[in-house]
C-alpha cells in the first residue's frame, strides 16, 4: 500500500470517527429533560407511563419529539402548580397546542400520571381517571407539523385521535379548522367560530355570552358557497394566506398575510390573543414576526380600555368618569358586577348607584348588537332606568337607535358627533382613582387614627388614675400593718407592768 492509499484510509477513519462523535453528541442532547430540551423517543407505545417531576421548576417536561426536533409533546406547567398537556415549538418554547384535561387542572405532582394503554389517560392517585382519549391505538406519534396523533395498524396507519381536532388558541400551517371547532383566547374571554359563510370573533362575557364583535364574510370570488355542499373550513396556506374553503380545494375567500405570494420558508400560525384580536405570525428563525392582524384599529377591539373606558381614536384611552385619569390608574373601574341595583328603579338596594352621561360616544361593534327605537334620549334612558339588569344605554339622536348595555360597560368609542349620548350607571365608590373615593378613604383613615388616638389617651389617663388610687390603697394598708405590729401586745405589756408595780409595793 502506497503513501497515498494510507493517507486516504486515515482520512476516511477520521471522518467516520468525527461522524460517530457527532451522533453521540446529538443523542446526548436529545435525551435531556427540562425546559427547551428534547427527548429521544419518536413514539409512545402501549405500557408507557410518566409523571411530572415536582423537584424541578421547569415549565415543560418533554416526553416525545417529532423527527425534525422542532416540536415536542409533554407536561406543561400552568399557574405555577397546575398541569396541562402541550405541544411546544422548541426554538421559541411557545406552546402551539395546550390541553387542560379538566376545568380545574390536576396538580404538578408525582401522584398524577400519563399512561398509554391504547388510550392516552391522565389519572390521579387520589381522584382516579381525570381524562381519557377513549381510543384503542397502537402508538402515540408527533408529526413534523406539530400534530399529536394516536394511530393503529401496521404500515397503513389509521389516525384515531389527533390534537389538530382540538385546537386551543392557535392554528398552525395546513391545519384545518371546521365549524365544530373553536379557538379560545388564553384568558377565556374571546372565541373564534365559523358560521355558514363567515368566521367571526365573539366575547364570552356578561349576561349574553357569544356576542359577536368582529366578522369576516366570504368574498366568493374564485368559488361560490353552495347550500347543501357541506360546512366551510379555514386553513393557513403555506403561500401566505388564510383560506376559506367548502367542498373543493379552490378557496371561496382569501385573507392575505403580509408574506402572501412571497417565497418564505417559515412556519405560519394564527392565534386568538387575550385582547380579542386574531393575529398571524411567521417564524423567522429567531422570533415570531407579525404577519396578519384581523382588527387594525385599537378602538375596534372589544375592550381596549376596560370597563367604563372610552377609546379615543389616535390618542388612547379615557374614562366615562372624567374625574378618573386613565394614564395614572391604567383602568377606569375595579368592579365588574353584571347585575346592578338602581335606587331609582329597584327596591331593596344595598348600595346606591349614580348616573353619568357622556356625549360623543358610540359602541365599536354596534352593528352586531340589538337595539330599540325610541323618539328621544329621555325615553332611551328610561328603558334602562326601569331595568335592574341594565348597566347603561347608548343613544343616537339621528337614527333613534337605543342600545341597551346589559353586561359590562365596555367597547365605547369617542366620536365627534355630540348627538350620540351615553347613559351609564356606576357605583358611587366603584371606580379606582376616583377623587371623591380617595378623599373619602383618606377621611375614613384619618377618622380611624383620631378615634384610636382618643381611645389611647383615655386608656392612658385611666391607667394613671388607677395607679394613683392603687398607690394610696397600698399606703393605707402599710400603715395599718405597722400600727398593728407595734401595739398588738399592748394589753399584755400593761398587765406585766402593773404586776411589777405591785411587787415593788409589797417589798
Image (cartoon, rainbow, N blue to C red):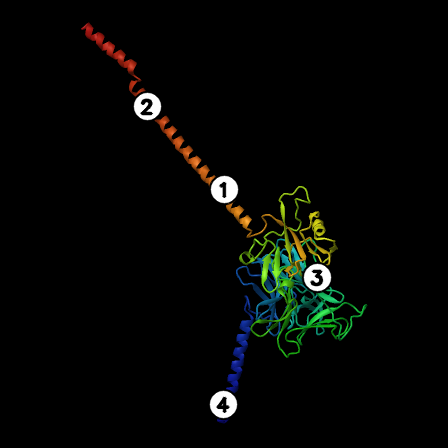
Residue 406 located left or right of residue 12? right
Residue at 29% in and 15% down: 490
Instruction: Name the residue furthest top.
Output: 506
Q: Secondary structure at mark 4?
A: helix
Which quadrant of the structure image shows residue 88?
Answer: bottom right
Q: Secondary structure at mark 2?
A: helix
Disc 1 versus disc 3: nearer the observer: 1
Q: Nearer the viewer, residue 367 or 65?
A: 367
Residue 170 in the image: state x and y as whole percent. 65, 66
Residue at 56% in and 54% down: 324
Q: Label 2: how many residues lie within 10 Å, few (<14), some (14-19) or many (20+)?
A: few
Residue at 37% in and 30% down: 468
- Asked if 482 appears above or below 363 in the picture, the reply is above
- Asked if 43 appears above or below 405 in the picture, the reply is below
Q: Secondary structure at mark 3?
A: loop
Residue 383 located left or right of residue 470? right
- Which label sits on residue 321? none
- The Cα atoms of the two marked residues, 1 and 2, are separated by 48 Å
First reached walking from the N terminus: tag 1 or tag 2: 1
Placement of the C terminus among the 4 image quadrants: top left
**What residue is disc 3 on?**
134
First reached walking from the N terminus: tag 3 or tag 2: 3
First reached walking from the N terminus: tag 1 or tag 4: 4
Mark yes or no: residue 205 visible.
Answer: no
- The Cα atoms of the two marked residues, 1 and 4, are separated by 96 Å
Q: Nearer the viewer, residue 504 or 453?
A: 453
**What residue is disc 2 on?**
479
Disc 3 versus disc 2: nearer the observer: 2
Disc 2 versus disc 4: nearer the observer: 2
Q: Label 1: how many residues lie within 10 Å, few (<14), some (14-19) or many (20+)?
A: few
- Which label sits on residue 447? 1
Amino acid at each position: 500500500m502506497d503513501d497515498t492509499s494510507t493517507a486516504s484510509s486515515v482520512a476516511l477513519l477520521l471522518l467516520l470517527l468525527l461522524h460517530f462523535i457527532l451522533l453521540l453528541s446529538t443523542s446526548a442532547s436529545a435525551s435531556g429533560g427540562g425546559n427547551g430540551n428534547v427527548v429521544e423517543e419518536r413514539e409512545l407505545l402501549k405500557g408507557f407511563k410518566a409523571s411530572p417531576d415536582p423537584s424541578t421548576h421547569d415549565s415543560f417536561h418533554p416526553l416525545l419529539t417529532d423527527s425534525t426536533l422542532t416540536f415536542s409533546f409533554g407536561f406543561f406547567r400552568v399557574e405555577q402548580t397546575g398541569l396541562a398537556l402541550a405541544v411546544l415549538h422548541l426554538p421559541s418554547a411557545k406552546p402551539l397546542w395546550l390541553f387542560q384535561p379538566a376545568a380545574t387542572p390536576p396538580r404538578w405532582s408525582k401522584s398524577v400520571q400519563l399512561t398509554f394503554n391504547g388510550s392516552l389517560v391522565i389519572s390521579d392517585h387520589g381522584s382516579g381517571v381525570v381524562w381519557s382519549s377513549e381510543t384503542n391505538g397502537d402508538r402515540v406519534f408527533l408529526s413534523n407539523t406539530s400534530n399529536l396523533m394516536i394511530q393503529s395498524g401496521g404500515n397503513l396507519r389509521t389516525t384515531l385521535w389527533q390534537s389538530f381536532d382540538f385546537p386551543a388558541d392557535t392554528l398552525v400551517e395546513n391545519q384545518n379548522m371546521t365549524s365544530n371547532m373553536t379557538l379560545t383566547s388564553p384568558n377565556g374571554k374571546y372565541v373564534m367560530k365559523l358560521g355558514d359563510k363567515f368566521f367571526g370573533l365573539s366575547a364570552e362575557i356578561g349576561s349574553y355570552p357569544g356576542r359577536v364583535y368582529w366578522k369576516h364574510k366570504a368574498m366568493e370570488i374564485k368559488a361560490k358557497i353552495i347550500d347543501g355542499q357541506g360546512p366551510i373550513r379555514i386553513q393557513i396556506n403555506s403561500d401566505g394566506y388564510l383560506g376559506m374553503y367548502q367542498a373543493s380545494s379552490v378557496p371561496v375567500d382569501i385573507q392575505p398575510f403580509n408574506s402572501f405570494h412571497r417565497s418564505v420558508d417559515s412556519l405560519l400560525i394564527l392565534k386568538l390573543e387575550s385582547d380579542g384580536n386574531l393575529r398571524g405570525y411567521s417564524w423567522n428563525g429567531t422570533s415570531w414576526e407579525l404577519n396578519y392582524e384581523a382588527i387594525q384599529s385599537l378602538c375596534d377591539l372589544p375592550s381596549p380600555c376596560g370597563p367604563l373606558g372610552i377609546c379615543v381614536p389616535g390618542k388612547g384611552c379615557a374614562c366615562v368618569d372624567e374625574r378618573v385619569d386613565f394614564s395614572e390608574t391604567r383602568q377606569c373601574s375595579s368592579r365588574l358586577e353584571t347585575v346592578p341595583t338602581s335606587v331609582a328603579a329597584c327596591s331593596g338596594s344595598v348600595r346606591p348607584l349614580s348616573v353619568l352621561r357622556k356625549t360623543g360616544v358610540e359602541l365599536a361593534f354596534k352593528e352586531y348588537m340589538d337595539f330599540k327605537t325610541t323618539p328621544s334620549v329621555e325615553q332611551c334612558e328610561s328603558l334602562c332606568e326601569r331595568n335592574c339588569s341594565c348597566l347603561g344605554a347608548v343613544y343616537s339622536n339621528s337614527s333613534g337607535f337605543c342600545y341597551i348595555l346589559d353586561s359590562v360597560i365596555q367597547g365605547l368609542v369617542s366620536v365627534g358627533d355630540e348627538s350620540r349620548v351615553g347613559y351609564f350607571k356606576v357605583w358611587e365608590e366603584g371606580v379606582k382613582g376616583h377623587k371623591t373615593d380617595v378623599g373619602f378613604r383618606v377621611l375614613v383613615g384619618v377618622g380611624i387614627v383620631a378615634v384610636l388616638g382618643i381611645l389611647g389617651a383615655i386608656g392612658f389617663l385611666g391607667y394613671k388614675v388607677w395607679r394613683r388610687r392603687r398607690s394610696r390603697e397600698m399606703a393605707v394598708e402599710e400603715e395599718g400593718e405597722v400600727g398593728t405590729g407595734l401595739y398588738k401586745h399592748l394589753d399584755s405589756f400593761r398587765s406585766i407592768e402593773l404586776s411589777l408595780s405591785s411587787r415593788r409595793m409589797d417589798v
